[in-house]
Image (tube, grey):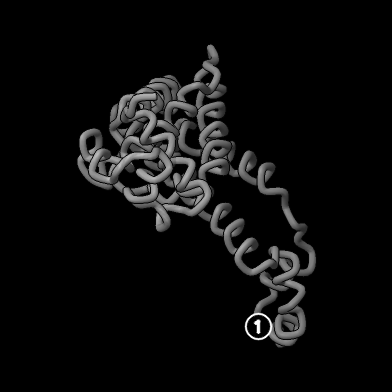
Amino acid sequence: MPLSRAKIAATAIRLADTHGLDGLSVRKIAKELGVGPMRLYDYVVNRSELLDLMVDAVYARIAEADQHPGWRATVLAIVHRTREVALDHEWFADLLGARPHLGPHALAVGESTAAALSQAPGVRSVDDLQRALGALNAFIVGALRREITERRTARSTGTDVSAWQAALGPYLTRMLDTGRYPTVARLVVDGAHLDAEETFQHNLVTVLDGITSRPHR
């Protein structure tokens, strides 16, 4: 099968899924494809361009999110698909939050999201839309990075959040017994271990309600 940019990107994605971005190299990709490393430079100029191809291939999956007649349902579908894809390709979250991605599929996702948000009742100007998109994207990046960081930590240490908290139990008990941290104590003692997906949905809806409601003047 002949070499192509799509094939190179797909191979790079498989390697990154297994080894992370730090384990990604032209040499490894070439070996997987059964070609010499220099052959890849006929298709991809440098690592930055390779990452752009990989990212846009992931956005292609996000672009497949179901379209709905209502703006709110459309935004929710896109964001949930983004989370689903990011959990499948953890390295993707490492590349979010900097300058916007401008590949064709990334632009398609951006267009769908912006077009939907522009129909929200509290979004009445370009400034409103820019702020709404900025707040929504900040939530997505922060939530995904936190969830993926916790998954990575659990894998690398063999300890999930509950086990980590249990190991710190004696120290935390001593600190909370001082009475200096009553609200933290309430969270630790009375707070439940929340499901990640349910928490993501709840917080997403809260953010979406806030950024699309008509502001109080």
- Asked if residue 123 is positioned above or below residue 179 in the image, the reply reads above
Does any portion of residue 43 appear in the rendered image?
Answer: yes
Does any portion of residue 124 appear in the rendered image?
Answer: no
* x, y percent for residue 15: 46, 46
Report the quarter where the N terminus lies: top left
Is residue 28 or residue 53 the one in the foreground? 28
* Residue pictured at 59% horizontal, 44% vertical: 203
Is residue 198 or residue 23 the one in the foreground? 23
Is residue 107 or residue 117 the one in the foreground? 107
- Asked if residue 159 is positioned above or below residue 122 in the image, the reply reads below
* Residue pictured at 32% horizontal, 27% vertical: 4
* x, y percent for residue 124: 36, 24
* Residue pictured at 71% horizontal, 79% vertical: 168
Q: Which residue is mark 1?
A: 180
Count of numbered circles on the image: 1
* x, y percent for residue 59: 42, 31
Report the quarter where the C terminus lies: top left
* x, y percent for residue 181: 66, 78
Amino acid identity at mark 1: Arg
* Residue pictured at 47% horizontal, 31% vertical: 212
* Crowding at mark 1 (Cα within 10 Å: few <14, some 14-19, many 20+): few
Is residue 26 or residue 110 the one in the foreground? 26
Q: Is residue 145 left or right of residue 129?
A: right
Question: Tag 1's secondary structure?
Answer: loop
